[in-house]
Image (spheres, helix red, strand yellow):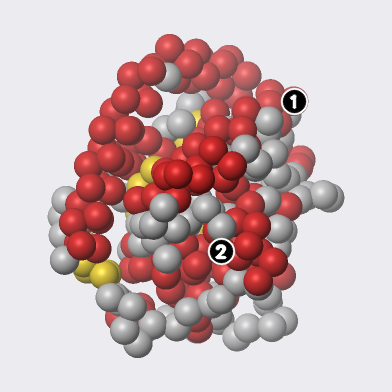
Amino acid sequence: MQQSFSLKIKRILDLSGAMFLLLVFSPLFLLTALLVYLNLGKPVFFLHPRIGYKGKTFMAYKFRSMRHLCDASGKPLPDGCRMTLFSRILRASSLDEIPQLLNVLKGEMSLIGPRPMLVEYLPYLKEHEYRRLDMLPGISGLAQISGRNLIGWDERFALDIHYVDHWSLTMDFVIAVKTFPVWILAQGISTPGYATAPRLDEERRDQIVPSTPDLHAHSDIKFDQAGSGTASNENVSSVSLSPEMRASLFSNIKPRALSVSENALQDG
């Protein structure tokens, strides 16, 4: 009952927060759209299918940040070849993510949660990693304030699963506040040697045989149309973080977390 109520509050905060941020950033939103048009042309927005809650596909909104360049076979060139100086500035500032506030209003995303995954990555998830699909994907999340693209996929997914298994409104609050320095300082934008990060399907191609997942086997949170729901941790695979990681990231996530939040929010 308490978890169900907390999830309803989370949805209310998502709606109010997304509307507030769209209002506050509306001049920046319009300016960014104009700059994208002047530098990269049409279309201004980039709609890309992503994996959301329980493996449901939705179209994620972003400002377009790359040119349309393909090889002789029609396959898009690597990201690094299609990015311009403007593209790199746009991504470093994370302004390309602002349109995802519209996904939050539609109930397809949350302000805080595991990042939405590329559709082609789904078959390469390990069995326990489907657990990350048991919450709405977010604009920011635990992995984003813990290294972003500077950490590997295994660690990123472990953080996502830890978030799902230990979620609370307090945790969302801490992640939201710690997101601001990560955003302002443009931390972890790309993995060294990559325009953004190595692809999961290429990294795990020799490790995992792609398969069609049974998402119903991993269902433990049932959302209604408003985005609220109830949760249970019964029969759920869980990934435990190392003691060091837990100590550094979650010493502040306790029932008395608000009393120690100042120390928790100084790093990151």
Question: Viewer-nearest of labels 1 and 2?
Answer: 2
> x%, y% of residue 161?
49, 69
Quadrant placement of the C terminus? top right
Q: Image check: 213 left or right of 105?
A: right
Residue at the (47%, 56%) spot, across then down: 253
1 or 2: tag closer to the N-terminus: 1
Quadrant in which residue 259 is drawn: top left
- Say which of 60 and 144 sits in front: 144
- Element carrying mark 2: helix
Please indicate whether residue 50 sits to the left or right of residue 205 in the image: left
Q: Which mark is residue 159?
A: 2
Element under disc 1:
helix
Q: Position of residue 229 (x, y in %)?
A: 20, 62
For badge 2, the amino acid type reads: Leu
As measured in the structure, the alpha-carbon distance from the residue carrying label 1 to the one carrying label 2 is: 32 Å
Q: Residue at x 62, y 28 (%)?
A: 184
Q: Is residue 154 visible?
A: no
Numbered circle sitting on residue 85 = 1
Where 157 falls versus 63 (above or below)?
Answer: below
